[in-house]
Amino acid sequence: MTALIFGGITVGLYWLFRSLYHKLKHPLLSPIATSGFVLILLLSYCHVPYHTYMVGGQWIDRLLGPAVVAFAYPMYRHRRLLRLFWLPLLSGVGIAVLMTLIMVTSWAKILKLQPLIFHTLLPESVTTPVAVDLSRELGGIPSLTAVMVVFAGMCGAVLGPWLYRWLGVNHPLARGIGLGSASHGIGTAQAFEEGEVVGAVSTVSMTLTALVTAGVSIWILEIL
Amino acid sequence: MRTWLIPVQVTGLWGIYKSGCWIKDLLQIPIPGSLIGMILLLCLLLTGIIPERWFAIGSEWLLRWLPLFFLPSIAGVLGVLPFLKEQGWTLAGVVLVNTLFVMMISSLMSQRLLRRRYSQEGEMD
């Protein structure tokens, strides 16, 4: 019964805020942020402990693994894009991953962050389902990583168009690569607003960013 | 719509995910099993061992509802709420600066590479 209630609340909230987002289309109303915020408010207001919530939540959580596997499909469908533009794609994503890791490491040194927080922040630019796994792998706090990842997505999706205008980035592929490699799924939703091509490139960049970060971040920890 | 295919295909994708986890444990690779599963499926699709239609509907469904599946992870911050109150602003600041800087570098760099490529192709015409 508990499982049904909490599962139902989660699905219901998400469905509600997804419909709202589809009406208004503003990245600040990104359904994961709004429904996540309301869910946390609701659980803390009703004093529901996390493990009680997870009696229902775990059934939803279990679909994350197969969902990451499903990313193979967009990659397969856009394989022509990858073959044609492998150089700008790989360089754009490569430099993005490198900069993220270097910057997080530097911030950790400057602000004297605990190792736990440093490990939590490392997968910050990676799509949430993979970031959660990576955070666990690196020894961070997965749920805190998830919140930071969603925030990174919103920053990029809201401020990205301004940034591009200011920098004069007008090539559709470059716009997609930047959005996908810095702000993953939420950035990609924004990219699809600009057009099919920008969205496709953003999807591919997001997936590549996840792969490259997973390959490199463990390494970084060993070097340090 | 053949909706009954969705649970069947999702179960299949779950099987590939489990194989990824199994490969991870077997070879002791420090990469999440889900990503290994994704690479596995991509290879199977590219080599034509698995036809595209086998998991097409299931994967489309999973990706359309993806954000829902990580809501439980988001709710997990309930456990670290005091911590978030104390350091949340610092972390948010770091993430904001990083995101914009990374987006700037990667888009400018790929635009430069794209322009060069484009002009070379233009000369060939």
Image (cartoon, rainbow, N blue to C red):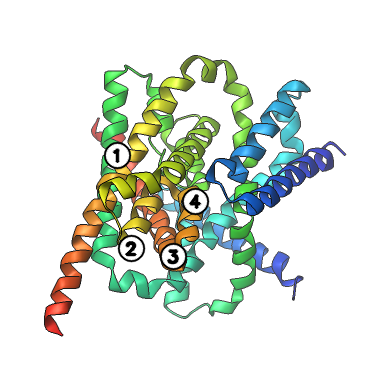
The residue that label 4 is drawn on is: A185
Q: Chain of mark 1?
A: B
> Are discs 1 and 4 located on one and the same chain?
no
State which mark lies toward you, 1 or 4: 1
Q: Position of residue B73 (x, y in %)?
A: 60, 37
Residue placed most toward the observer, B19 or A34: A34
- Label 4 packing within 10 angstroms: few (<14), some (14-19), many (20+): many
Cβ–Cβ under 8 Å for marks 3 and 4: no
The residue that label 2 is drawn on is: A173
In the displayed structure, would residue A27 be above or below residue A208? above
Q: Amino acid at mark 1?
A: Phe
Q: Quadrant of residue A126?
A: top left
The residue that label 1 is drawn on is: B101
- SS class, disc 1: helix
> Are discs 3 and 4 located on one and the same chain?
yes
- Label 2 packing within 10 angstroms: few (<14), some (14-19), many (20+): many
Q: Quadrant of residue A176?
A: bottom left
Q: Is residue A43 left or right of residue A97?
A: right
